[in-house]
Image: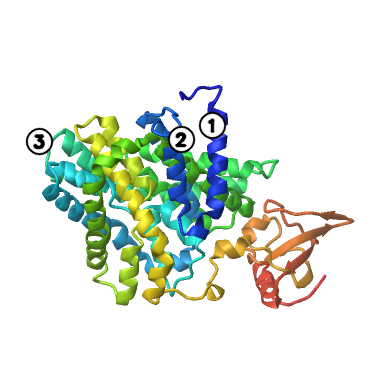
Amino acid sequence: MNLTIENILLVGSLLLFISIVAGKTSYKFGVPTLVLFLGIGMLAGEDGIGISFNNPQIAQLIGVISLNFILFSGGLDTDWKSVKPIMKEGFALSTIGVFLTAIGLGTFVYYVTDFTIYESLLLGSIVSSTDAAAVFSILRAKNLALRANLRPTLELESGSNDPMAYVLTIAFLGLVINQDQGIASMIPLFLQQMVLGTIAGFGFGKLSKIIINKIKLDFEGLYPVLVIALMFITFSVTDFVGGNGFLAIYICAVFLGNQYLIHKKTILKMYDGLAWLMQIVLFLTLGLLVFPSQIVPVIGIGLVISLFLIFVARPVAVFLSLIPFKMKLRRRFYISWVGLRGAVPIVFATYPLLAGIDKANMIFNIVFFISLTSILIQGTTLSVVAKWLNVSIPSSEKILTPSEKFLEEHPKTEMREIGIARGSKVVGQQIVDLEFPKTAIIAMIKRGNKYIAPNGSTVIEADDLLIVLSENEKGIKKVFKALNIREFSAA
């Protein structure tokens, strides 16, 4: 079946519906939803019911767009207070760990295949990073509660290591095409990508906050659309100036996720849904791109490479990169095990296809098989291994992230009427600028004889009477602090 304008919406919506329904029941059988999405795409492809899709360029475009949403959503959910204590460990894993994985696996591939050294290192680079979509979705879908800072470490690593893998992939692809160049030529590219990506991420993060809070749009539904526009601007401008766009949007999102924003709850909820949509679309697309008949010949060598990656290359890279840090042995083992490969390596594997190098198809098929086995072997055993290593805790003791707390509907048991005196420092400020506690709300403002339903852009005026609801007395105290009022006195 050829995809046409007439049937693409029908086919796409049916595949999307089937994926959602299948994903709803998948964990009852211990199968990660991501595998089902891939499988449905493969069954719908040319070797299945006959949908013809063999366009790596479109697949790459869909992949890059999807990764923008997935990384941005992960960044918005990242709590800076939780991440700050493990920043060094996360940075080591996302840079040194990725590099060592690429070199270790690439060297192994060189000795067990007929690939050249640069082709082998290219393959190692493509699968060197853990997949943010796989880690975020599986950890959250399993509702896995982990001890201490283990979960923030895993999510920080998976959200921030794609840029390193991207740089290595582009660099070694360049060496495969231009073999007269040396490995030293990678260093300027690496520094340029990382430095510009970091600067752009922080710069666009601060600029985006100002735009979101000051633009004053008439409709609440436009704010998530505005954030999407800012996300793509961050990525494309950073990429245009030679920086790493993936790194920039992740840093930008982490910054925004830890700021007070107008309609932040609406933005977070929309991005959570969009991240799931993009995961489904991404895996379905990559499933359509794969021909199962071409996977069969590489199963043997693919399994050998995949097992080496899971049991040797990844653990060695993790242990070496974490040598300077104090961490219990069982936690290092668990970090090694959560080295999930998913859609990102498959997206990166389209770059050799578009470059037209000799072994591009074989690299793509091996990478696909590695991702599939990684999700099947590691993704289905995360809970079991966590219990074996004693790094999990009961779900009832799980500490919610600030984003999860923010999106919860807390029962409001405390109410105060707080008058704003003339000359108060908060007069003339928007509510979003007051840094209100996340578990308290201004339910209503009485202004003269009128009652106003406020939002983040509402400006506080003198003689306003704020009707404040909070989940407890502690929240009310934080409200008074935010309003710069010392004594508890109602108007």
Above or below for 170 versus 481: above
Q: Residue furthest right?
A: 449
Examine the image and state in which quarter residue 352 appears: top left
CA neighbours of label 3 inside 10 A, class few (<14), some (14 to 19), many (20+): few
Q: Is residue 473 visible?
A: yes
Q: What residue did someone put label 3 on?
A: 180
Examine the image and state in which quarter residue 454 appears: bottom right
Camera-side residue of 43 and 243: 43
Q: Secondary structure at mark 1?
A: helix
Q: Which is more foreground, mark 1 or mark 2? A: 2
Q: Position of residue 316 (x, y in %)?
A: 22, 64
Question: Quick check: 289 left or right of 6?
Answer: left
Q: Mark 2 is on which residue type? A: Ala
CA neighbours of label 2 inside 10 A, class few (<14), some (14 to 19), many (20+): many
Q: Position of residue 414 (x, y in %)?
A: 76, 73
Q: Which is more foreground, mark 1 or mark 3? A: 1
Q: Which is more foreground, mark 3 or mark 2? A: 2
Point 42% across, 57% down: residue:
135
**Marks 1,2: beta carbons within 8 A:** yes
Mark number, residue 11: 1
Point 48% across, 67% down: residue:
144
- How far apart marks 1 and 3 lie (CA) works out to 47 Å
Question: Quick check: 382 left or right of 442?
Answer: left
Q: What residue did someone put label 2 on?
A: 44
